[in-house]
Image: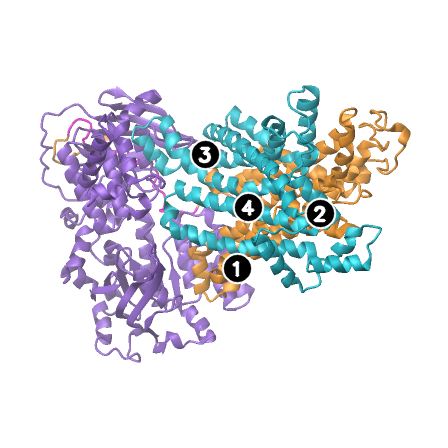
Chain colours: A orange, B cyan, C purple
Amino acid sequence: MTTDPTPPGPVARPDQEHQVAPPDVVTLGEVDAVDETEAPASLWVEAWRELRRRVLFWVSAAIIVLVVLVALFPGLFARQDPRYCVLTRSLGGPEAGHPFGFDFQGCDIYARTIFGAQASVTVGVLTTLLVAILGTAVGALAGFYGGWFDTVLSRVTDIFFAVPLVLAAVMVMSIFRANRNVLTVVLVLGVFGWPQIARIARGAVMGVKNADFVTAARSLGASRFATLVRHLIPNALAPIIVTATVALGTFIVAEATLSFLGIGLPSTTVSWGGDISTAQGQLRVAPHVLFYPAGALALTVLGFIMMGDAVRDALDPKARKR
Amino acid sequence: MVRYLGRRLLQAVPVFFGATLLIYFMVFALPGDPVLALGGDRGISDALAAQLREQYNLDKPFIVQYLLYLQGILTGDFGTTFAGRPVGELIASAFPVTFQLALMALAFEAILGIGAGLVAGLRKGKLFDATVLVVSLLVIAVPTFVIGFVLQFVVGVRWGWLPVTVGSNVSFTSLLMPAMVLGAVSFAYVLRLTRTSVAENLSADFVRTATAKGLSRRRVVNVHVLRNSLIPVITFLGADLGALMGGAIVTEGIFNIHGVGGTLFAAIRQGHAPTVVSFTTILVIVYILANLLVDLLYAALDPRIRYDD
Amino acid sequence: MSDQPAQPPPSSAPSPQPLLKVRDLRVSFTTATGVVDAVRGANLTVYPGQSVAIVGESGSGKSTTAHAVINLLPGTGRVSGGSILFDGRELVGASPKTFVGVRGKEIGLVPQDPMTNLNPVWSIGFQVREALRANGFEGSRREADARVAELLSEAGLPDAARRAKQYPHEFSGGMRQRALIAIGLAARPRLLIADEPTSALDVTVQRRILDHLEALTAELGTAVLFITHDLGLAAERAEHLVVMYRGQVVESGPSKQILAAPQHAYTQRLVSAAPSLASRRIQSAKERGTRATDLLAVTRGDGISEERGELMRVEHLTKEFVIRGATRSAKTLRAVDDVSFTVTRGTTLALVGESGSGKSTVANIMLNLLQPTSGVIWFEGTDLRTLDPRAEFAFRRRVQPIFQNPYGSLDPMYSIFRTLEEPLRVHRVGDARSRRARVRELLDMVAMPASTLRRFPNELSGGQRQRIAVARALALEPDVIVCDEAVSALDVLVQAQILTLLNDLQTELGLTYLFITHDLAVVRQIADEVVVMRNGQVVEHATTDAVFDQPTQEYTRELLSAIPGASLDIFGAA
């Protein structure tokens, strides 16, 4: 700080004299110049930059990639046929070529764990897709058009919310008795799983509905529907993606629960839920039979939930502020 | 306030009718004949089938069946099972147990979830927070039935601290472990919700203003952070009571509890339609009532909605 | 710069010890990308009973400095160097307990945004009582309640005893701010930090509250540290100014001296750009060949639409909203009440009013986004109500809006190119190549580099976004641009830049502006004609010069005198 060389007039109190910083301390650039140094970044690119700094993201990404690879190409990871069982090996411990040992039927647990991934991942991914599409459509329409339309759709959402997911799934699955397969499970979980996404989507759409850029689009002459599709839904997508990622994990658990109850996937399909269910009886004598399928299931679900957390933190501007 | 509650009550009416209609539809109208299914592989005589159809109004149009059934429920007549046992009797024996179980689970998840969530939110990024978060993630990721088995095996069988199964011995101690298993997943959600909510409110402007008044940190947290943070948590807990009662199927199976879940599961498997419909209807009513209770609590906690429209 | 006559030294002649002495204060924030210094070596002195103002734009570190004093830095912020002496005691590194003792009791805070600074779940009375109890008030509950009512009415809240039982959401912004003042002064602190205490409020309310605060603190002998972005307000309310820019104090000294003879380049720019200080339209209408008043004169009279000059005419416009209140019956709110005026081609009409005056509703009706309850809008002789969808689509090309909030007016998911191309695409103007060329042309018009095309709104500052919003509005070569508080959210220098830009574009393209604002100071810089609105009605309608020089209505005079810095004659001299 330097004192102004020619202080005009008044005698100020100590420390309150007219003081001016030397002009070179602050470079007064052009007012509001555009920073051209950094590469352009959309919100998604920024979120990605934020994401890749997080350990949580890399750990969950590694888990998800691994699980998806196993689900797509189980043959690459296990040579054994999961359905080839020799009763004499029942509950046998690990041995060469069979690192996880054998279950009650004498099947190779490692092979069953590897091949079981397919059912879980398929159910999880397909159900989430179905739920995301259905929920976003219902929620976005309700939130955007409002009025009686919103009232009706919101009540319908409430109705599906009022029936507990597992209970409804049990009821419908017992109707399907004869033809239970991955698709019926997806359908059932999807039909009763969408209200959560619908509520999120409705809230998110209502949150941006009154933004100025929406009014601006309408003043341009864009139709209401075009505004919804081009401006509102893309802006409401972040919370939907986060919820859907976490929901993917919970759908995998739901599928396992149904299989555990004996009304999910048929016993001919190799699945973690079914294997856990059969392992239950031998928990006292052979805990490893339960451990591997349950561990694989937990790891998969963990991967998706952690991914949801990581993505939420990266997308949430509040969390990103210093 | 009255207006607000009136509106919520009014909203609950279509939800009640819609949900019961949905359930009724699933049980009676979808492919598969409940009467024929009753006979299982053996089949039943045409005469008996016709008699049953008449008794359960199955010969009438679907919507009439539904309305007649609803009339029965609203006058306290839940009908009888195909086997001839009054459904009301089943309800009386099954619901109290599950209700107690669900309430204990709710208390467990509320007390531990809010407590741990509060501490974690206040110390975001610290060791306690990280530990608690990992635990909550594991609880969500490991299916309830696995947690059930393991707890049952370790705490019940190995250590012998708590009864392994419940059976006819319904007591606080015997329900303790099942309640923890039932509430485990929700506990994790309550914890995460409280944590986020507390952390968010901590940086709210009004909290800074409260600090600037010269309040101690303890008072700021208790008076200004906690109450505001509880609002979303209460909403979650209210909606959860219904889910806990309906979702007890797995837990009741593991611990051999003769409650709603077990009875309902057996009824669904055996195609006992009146039992299924009655039970689920009551579950829906519980869900709706719990939500209304939440609305009341919500109004008590947040003065804004007492007046807002 | 003229030499000002010497200002008499403050009345409390024997210079006492400073109450607050900040030396070389450094505050830093830890972010993911490293440590950012928000305040770099700030110095500041406040004497007992004195009022001092820190002036700066957003990001200058003014609030951070103030918050550092009471250790209320947000997030990862921490004091990394320097000293803060309060009454001779060092506060840097003091224990949390010390701060609990200092806050409220010795240093009070009146925060910035009245809407978020009161806890919504507790009554106003509770929140004031808490401030008393925390600072050693020992009386009974009844005594405490009486004291609360006293404090609230002292802060200018009428019917305080009853009001104390109410909750924040039942209070207007001004009432909340009074409650916050009562809280800040509850324990009679010796220093009150007032952080932009009124920037969220209407000008007349702002003036009343500041007057009240000034009288109150003078009576109590409380020193006040104002934090503000408004140089006029600072100069009017404080005897000593501290100007901050990018975390540093660039100039400090007696208020009048700084205003009269700013020494630092930044302060000079700030003084010359401050709208409250400007007394003339940025670019006089003469440069366009005609005087604005002449242009206007043509349409006075019966205002037949074919006549030269008239572009839009608003006739007996009324808009009612049905609001369902707490009571059973639905109430109708008359937001716009029999409003008529004419917009002349190539000129700027300012619609001025405070919140609730109905000015934005008029704008939305003129944009044909809202249907009037009664009344007619004529656009070039066509009744807007008679437009079929095709004609409406054509109308949209010719009337475009620019909104207030630079953060909400651009779709965050759209690149700047897509944002600017959207209007062209919607109206099927040209092919991809010509559209690209046009977008570049538009960017050039608002003085943005071509590299901006691939950028996204989150990478641009508020002023830059607003420039993009101007470019978007221009894309379809409209005749009318409706600016709804288009510069209100911007810092002074950026605001001046945008106003100049708008003005240049008007001359160049012959645009007609409808300028909706609460800020009369801005009106003076840009408008040819002013319509003053209050409670949905037109209070005064005249040329800008007439409104400023000979306002005929009491309300207009009130608005004018409420402009911060209006009372300082020094501006005329500078």
Question: Amino acid type of disc 3?
Answer: Ala
- Residue underneath mark 4: B287
Q: Residue at x 40, y 66 (%)?
A: C369
Q: Residues within 10 Å of mark 4 (few under 14, many from 20)?
A: many
The magenta segment is A13-34
The span from disc 2 to disc 4 (Cα, nearest Å) is: 20 Å
Question: Amino acid type of disc 1?
Answer: Val
- Residue underneath mark 1: A152
Mark 3 or 1, closer to the camera? 1
- Residue underneath mark 3: B199
Q: Locate the C terminus of chain A by quadrant.
A: top left
- Residue underneath mark 2: B268
Residues tagged by mark 3 and mark 1 found on one chain of the structure: no
| Circle nearer the N terminus (2, 3) | 3
- Would you say residue A28 sits in the magenta stretch? yes
Q: Locate the N terminus of chain A by quadrant.
A: top left
Question: Amino acid type of disc 4?
Answer: Tyr
Residue C480 placement (x, y as % from top left): 36, 67
* Secondary structure type for disc 2: helix
Q: Which of B241 and A289 is in front in this view?
A: B241
Question: Amino acid type of disc 2?
Answer: Ile
The span from disc 1 to disc 4 (Cα, nearest Å) is: 20 Å
Q: Do the residues labelled 1 and 4 touch (CB within 8 Å)?
A: no
- Up/down of C400 relative to A36, above or below: below
Q: Nearer the viewer, residue C488 or B32?
A: B32
Q: Which of A198 and C365 is in front in this view?
A: A198
Residue B53 placement (x, y as % from top left): 73, 59
Q: Mark 1 lies on which chain?
A: A
* Secondary structure type for disc 4: helix
Q: Residues within 10 Å of mark 1 (few under 14, many from 20)?
A: some
Q: Which chain carries label 3?
A: B
The span from disc 2 to disc 3 (Cα, nearest Å) is: 44 Å
